[in-house]
Image: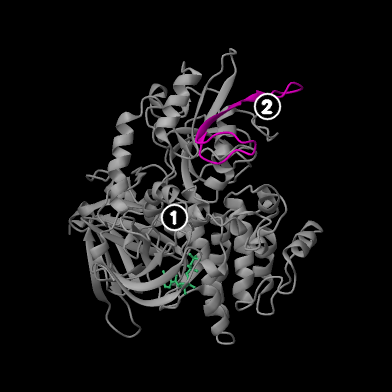
Amino acid sequence: MDLNMYPRVILKGTLFKKSQQKRRTSPCNYKERFFVLNTEELSYSERRPGKKPITKGCIELSRIKCVEIVRSDVPIPCEFKYPFQVVYDNYYLYMFAPDNDSRLKWVRAIKEETKDNLLSSKYHPDFWIEGRWRCCHQTEKLATGCSNYYPIGTASKKPLPPTPDPQRRFSSPEERIVVALKNFTPSEDTDIPLHKDEEYIVIDSSQPNWWTVRDKDGNVGSVPCIYITEKFTNNIEKYEWYNKDISRAEAEELLMKENKEGAFMVRDSRQTGVYTVSVFTKAPGSNGEKFPRVKHYKIRQTESGESRYYLAEKYLFSTIPELIHYHQHNAAGLITRLRHCVSRDRSTSLRIEEMASEAWELEPEEITFGEELGSGQFGLVWKGSWCGKNVAIKTVRENSMSEEEFKEEARVMMKLSHPKLVQLYGACTQRSPICLVFEYLKNGCLANYLRTSRGSLTQEILLSMCVDVSEAMAYLESSNFIHRDLAARNCLVSEDLVVKVSDFGMTRFVLDDKYTSSEGTKYPVKWSSLEVIKYSRFSSKSDVWSFGVLMWEVYSEGRLPYECRSNAEVVESLNAGQRLLQPRLCPETVYQLMHWCWKEKPEDRPSFALLLHELASLADS
Ligand code: ADP
């Protein structure tokens, strides 16, 4: 008998597989199967004691286009927790191994057998779930992958793919330099180590938690993106906000023409080697200055020691790009934060922006109003329908919202899309009052839901509510978007108890100063971090503080934090190092996470990516 006639078995063993969800609505099941990889095919069968195995599926190896580890932080609801994917034709087969070694063994073996196939050059490192790719948020299942696929690279012990020609290093706009904030020891073959303060080049930052970087020796691999930070250099010429050789008068003319609050640019001062930030504002000046107008701030340098840069107040930065980045998020002494950069050569990009801005404008005839749902910051909220969908319609009372700013931001907010964020569908600004149209969630606001369900919410539900919110926030964090008012009252609950985050970024458009000034009676002091209360310094880390308070609200079943204390008393006790007490229903592990969120220094708090990881592992265990 010629043994070569038969395919040789390479690997076999029990793994779990996820049903392939060929139809979007089909349920997602995990099935235990016995897999056999031979030199021709990958087949799987159902084995039941005392019965003949039944072959359930078979994939010819020649059809395989990619096999790779799945990196995801979603909890895996089957016994085996190490996922990998096999992409063949237009299908995705997700398989789950019992441990990392077994997973690598399978991935390497299939890679080896398929290395001469016509392979994909890109793949999706995370799962396809609920109608979108978790890695790049594309909603088309067949959308091209968002990460480079290395047929023999990352998951195998073989040498990494050759380093691209150094001349080409910066040809891709994606590639940028980062610095490691701390050491990182790889836990998987696909990772590379990070050494504190060393530089790396980002090759792929499309995933929320793990980025692919290249080190100085050309090794490529994944690292947690919370451990690295962008390296700012003092070469400002590449930045869109820098206008070389522009006079003060020309700058003023351009900014006045732009006519947008916070329009700004950086230009050369008359004094050589010195730069000026010019900002447009419509805000009334304290000493009777006329408005609208352009204000100019010289970028100053400290004289003693290592030179550092600052603007109005003494927040010091090592480079000008860092300083600008900071003031894009915080006014901190400027008349307004730096909102839109203006450059001389922007006529084409402006036109594109203008065209895109119409995408969120909805036709009033398409919107039907139903019952009233409640009353919000800007006015009444109604249930309604739009394009056959149930929606929530927020009407905006006159003078309650900075409509112009909202219109500018609506485009950004519409682009934010995640299963755990309440989707903004668009706005109708052609009639008064203007109204904003959102996804409708049947169980309304989380704070009320917690109160009305007291006594009936299980530990599992309480934890899954926190996981949901941390998922949405990890997404906002990775999109560099700050919520600014995260609290249970700003989350909504769906019919099947999924919690979604709402009202992200909306406080920026509130005109009522009782709400916006930290001394105002409506200011959410009890959810605010110390640096927000003291200096209005918002960041994703100030959102993390608020998230700690939100977790406290969840485990207190909707009680008000610091119930009997005034805002002033709360600030005093926070300054004295006191924090909210452990709610009766809250496990110690979750309370420790809350405390971590309430660290005084923002940099000592965890990122949302890390919180999500911690909470998801608790939910898993
Ligand atoms: P705002 O944040 O503008 O102050 P809210 O979001 O608190 O307004 O809205 C007021 C009430 O309207 C909420 O308590 C909630 O009951 C209801 N509501 C708001 N948005 C939705 C929505 N998308 N789906 C269902 N109900 C909603």
Q: Is residue 266 visible?
A: yes
Task: Give residue 233's position: percent from left, percent from top.
Answer: 55, 26
> Which is more N-terminal, label 1 or label 2?
1
Q: Which residue corresponds to mark 2?
A: 308
Task: Give residue 30's position: percent from left, percent from top.
Answer: 36, 73
Residue 609, quarter of picture: bottom right
Distance from the alpha carbon under mark 2 to that under mark 1: 40 Å
Most prominent secondary structure in the magenta stretch?
Answer: loop
Seen in the picture, residue 458 relative to 478 is either above or below; the reply is below
**Counting other residues with Cα less than 10 Å from the Cα at mark 1, is it few (<14), some (14-19), or many (20 or more)?**
some
Give the magenta-colored segment's residue range.
Answer: 280-308
Mark sitting on residue 71: 1
Q: Measuring 40% from the left and 59% from the top, which residue is drawn there?
A: 418
Quadrant of the drawing holding the N terminus = bottom left
Q: Amino acid at mark 2?
A: Arg
Determine whether the beta carbon of the residue marked 1 sits less than 8 angstroms from the nearest atom of ligand 1: no
Q: Amino acid at mark 1?
A: Arg
Q: Is residue 125 visible?
A: no
Seen in the picture, residue 335 relative to 379 is either above or below; the reply is above
Quadrant of the drawing holding the C terminus = bottom right
SS type, badge 2: loop
Cβ–Cβ under 8 Å for marks 2 and 1: no
